[in-house]
Each structure stands twice: as C-alpha cells, then as structure tokens.
Image: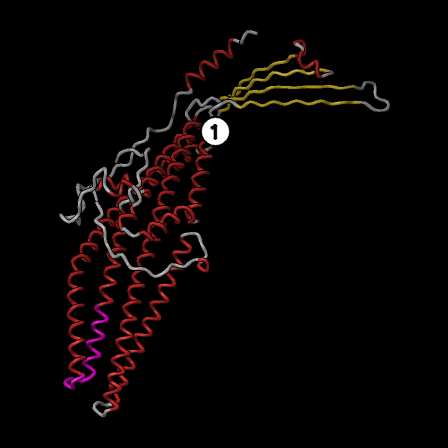
Amino acid sequence: MARPPALALVLAAAALLSGCSVTPPYQHPQMAVPASFKEAGATWAPAAPADALDRGPWWELFQDAELNRLAEQVQLSNQNIAAAVAAYAQAQAVVRQQRAGLLPSVSLSGGATRTGGEGATRSGLSTQASLGVDWAPDLWGRLQSGVNSAQASAQASEADLASARLSAVGTLASAYFQLREADAEIELLQATVEGYERSLQIVRNRYSAGVVAQTDVLQAQTQLANARADLATVRQNRARFEHAIAVLTGRAPADFALARAQWVAAVPDVPVGVPSTLLQRRPDIAAAERAVAAANAQIGIQRAAYFPNLSLGASVGSGGSSVADLFKASTLVWSLGLSVAQTIFDAGATAARVEEAQAAREGRVAVYRQTVLTAFQTVEDQLTVLRTLQEQEPLRREAVAAAERTAQQLLNRYREGQVGYTEVVTAQVSALSAQRALLQLQVNRQLAAVTLVQALGGGWQAPWQAPA
C-alpha cells in the first residue's frame, strides 16, 4: 500500500519542525554572592567537601545517642514528611503524564451486533473492529515545555521534601535540647528546694531559741514556696516538650515517654563554608530556583498558541457478518487524516497570557532572590548569636561560682548571728538565678547551632542543581 505523497511531505515537515521551540532559554537567576560571611571571622572553620555536614546526618554532630534514635524515628514516622513524600510522588506522576503526550496514542475498538425479530426482513450478526492512531506533533515545543515545567516542579517538590525533613528534625532537636535543659533545671531546683528546706529548719530552730524574729521564718517559707512553684512550672514545660517530640515522631503523647537522662550540652563546631555553597545546600533555595525554571517553561507553552496545531490520525478497520470476516483483506478499510487548527482572532488573549507568564517568571525570580537574601541574613544572625553566647558562657560560670560562694558565706554568718536573714535570702536568690541563667545560655547555644545548621541547609544538595 503506497503512502500518499502529500501525507509523506506532512510527516517529514512535522519531524523537522518538532525540534523547534518558542520557549526562551532558561538562565539561572543571578545573585551577587559575597566572598565570605561577615560574622564568620576567624572563629569558624571553612567547610570542605568531606566536612561533617556533607557526610551524613547533621544531628550526629551533637553526639547524643538518644537524639540520634529520635531523629531516625522522625524520618520514618513524621506526618509532615509523609505528606511531602506523597506530594513528590504526585509530582513525578505528573512528569510521566506530560511525557506521554509526546508520543502517539493508540486505541483499539471492536463490537458485535445481532439483529432480528418478528417481521424483520433480515436478521443476523454484524462485527466490526478498528485500530486507530492519533498524534499531535510537538511543532513549537509546547508539549516539551509542559514536560520541562512538570519536571522542574517535581524537582521543586523534591527540594520541598528535603526542606520538610530538615525542618522536622530541626524542630525535634530544638524540642529535645529544651527537654534536656528542663531535666537539668529540675535537678537544680530539686537540690535548691532541699537546701531551702534545710535553711528553713535552721531559721525555725533559731526562732524557737528566741534568737531571731518570726519574720525570718516567714521569709524562709516564702523562698521555699517560690522554689517549689518554679519546680512545678519547669516540670510542666518538660511535659510540653515531651508531647511535641511524641507528635514529631508520629505518636500520640499518651503512648510516648522519654525518661530523664544526663544532658549532653556540647555545641559542635559547624563548618560554615563560603556563601556560594549556601545556594546548593538549602532546599528552599533549590525549590525557589526550580520554580523559576517551571515558570520559564510556561512562557513557551503560552507562546505556542501563536502557531497552528497539527494533528495526525490513522485508522484501519474491518467488518463483516461473522468474526472470520474481520480477517479478510476484502473487508479491510483504512483512513489517514490531517487536521490543522489556528486561532485567527482572540482579541489579544494569547498575548495577555504570554505577558502573564512572563510576569509570573519575574515574580519567581524575585522570590528566589529574596529567599537567598533571607538565607544570608539567617546565617549571619546565627553566627552573631553563637559568637556572643560563646563569649558569655565563661562569664556566666564565673558569676555562678561567685554567687554560690556568697550565698554559702552569708548562710554561715547568719548561723553565727552576724547578718540578717534578708541578706541570706537575697544571696540565695541571686545564686539560683545565676545557675538557671547558665543553663539557659547552654541550651541557647545548642538551639542556635541547630538554627545555623538549618540555615546552611543541613548538608542537603540536589544532584540536578546547576552551580550557583
């Protein structure tokens, strides 16, 4: 069977034109990247390809076995991560769906009909079967632009998944460190309550002996009651952190308990690297960049409306009065078709859609640049916080040591009747405040380190991402 010359010419032209594309070439959004972080100074070690963040789980830098165990549970059971995984799978399915549009669609149909009845002139069986092929050549790159847009969106969804993992584990680490700080504060307040109980007994003995006034007893009772109330508040805070950890690991708070344990208050040295690596590590920046690529592909999709759509169709079928007739050459019927559609006038709707797509791309570029600037700001902020807290810790320890010595000396002098109990209370309150401030500073250093790791992207790097 000879192919009609006109159809052969159409197919050849379609094959040649299918490589054309009206989508503008994608250019990575440009950003002015500083040579180094302003607040890094000489304190921070530069990141290297083999640094701790690139080797694997960043939470292991804190050297806490219980945190490592909980982080693994979050990876498996956190529902926000599960939702991000489902969104990524959905995006991948959209890519496959768009790619399928580049290929011809093949359909097969068939049927059999029996006719008859009283008074009918003819009765019998009629059968038919047909095979059809439809293909719309991608002359102007519209379909390929759809594939590129869907693929960029899928890659953005992949980055969103990484961001969800980073956020979930970061939130877990923050809640865990605050829980362990609460454990240490509970231990401190329990020891403080025991000390205040001993002080109250000393005051009562001196009051019974007629050495001091009743106001000393009342002061000691007030101080003890306040310490007990503070202890109850810290226990409440610990319970809230435990509930948060339960939900992060995908469990109901009633089914989860975290025993008290020694707090590992270590703060790791986090390699900060150079600012350009931030553009490769942070998943939110990667997602913003992929959104720009998707928006760029949409311009090509809208521009393709300026050009005609070409559709090719072919079918071959057979029919007869029996199934055997379907396989006879004499009953074979074939058809070839070509259709072209072109919008002649749409009152500028196509131009408006192109302008809309271009504006959407510019908006995505602006979002990308703002995301990068915000990332730089967060890193600089956390470097400042960590440096300040590091400078404050030895001063806080010095204050704790001095306040504890003062409180003990005044209590000894009180026993000997050299000072009033008001001075003892003031010194003990100052000592407790200094101890709690030191604990808060230590947990703030860990929280700042977690935030810095998140700001640096947690070591995540997409293999498809273009260099910054």
At x 73%, y 19%, the residue is 126
Q: Amino acid at mark 1?
A: Phe
- Picture coordinates of residue 56 (x, y %)? 30, 42
Q: Quadrant of the C terminus?
A: top left
Q: Residue at x 71, y 22 (%)?
A: 112
Q: Is 2 situated left or right of 142 in this image?
A: right
**Magenta span main SS:** helix
Give how far across and how far down residue 110 sits, in percent: 66, 22
Seen in the picture, residue 163 relative to 110 is either above or below; the reply is below
Which residue occupies the foreground of this view, 381 or 239?
239
Q: How is the image coloured?
A: secondary structure
Of 92 and 356, nearer the camera is 92
Kindly give the residue lying farthest to the top in the view shown: 2
> Was residue 396 drawn as part of the magenta stretch in this picture?
no
Side of 105 relative to 443 (left or right)? right
Residue tagged by mark 1?
345
Q: Where 206 falls versus 61 (above or below)? A: below
- The quarter of the picture where the N terminus appears is top right
Which region is colored magenta?
A: 415-434
State the SS at label 1. Answer: loop
In the rendered view, tell whether residue 168 sits above or below residue 416.
Answer: above
- Crowd tier of the residue under label 1, counting other residues whose Cα lies within 10 Å: few below 14, some 14–19, many 20 or above: few
- Counting from the top left corner in percent of width and height, residue 414 is at 17, 83
Where does the image place residue 75, in percent across and percent down from the top left?
39, 46
Q: Residue furthest bottom?
A: 210
Q: Residue at x 32, y 39 (%)?
A: 286
| Relative vertical location of residue 199 with respect to residue 178 in this rendering, above or below | below
Find the residue positioned furthest to the right.
Answer: 119
Indicate yes or no whether the magenta region holds residue 419: yes
In screen coordinates, is 143 left or right of 187?
A: right
For residue 123, what is the image quadrant? top right
Instruction: Residue 392: name its quadrant.
Output: bottom left
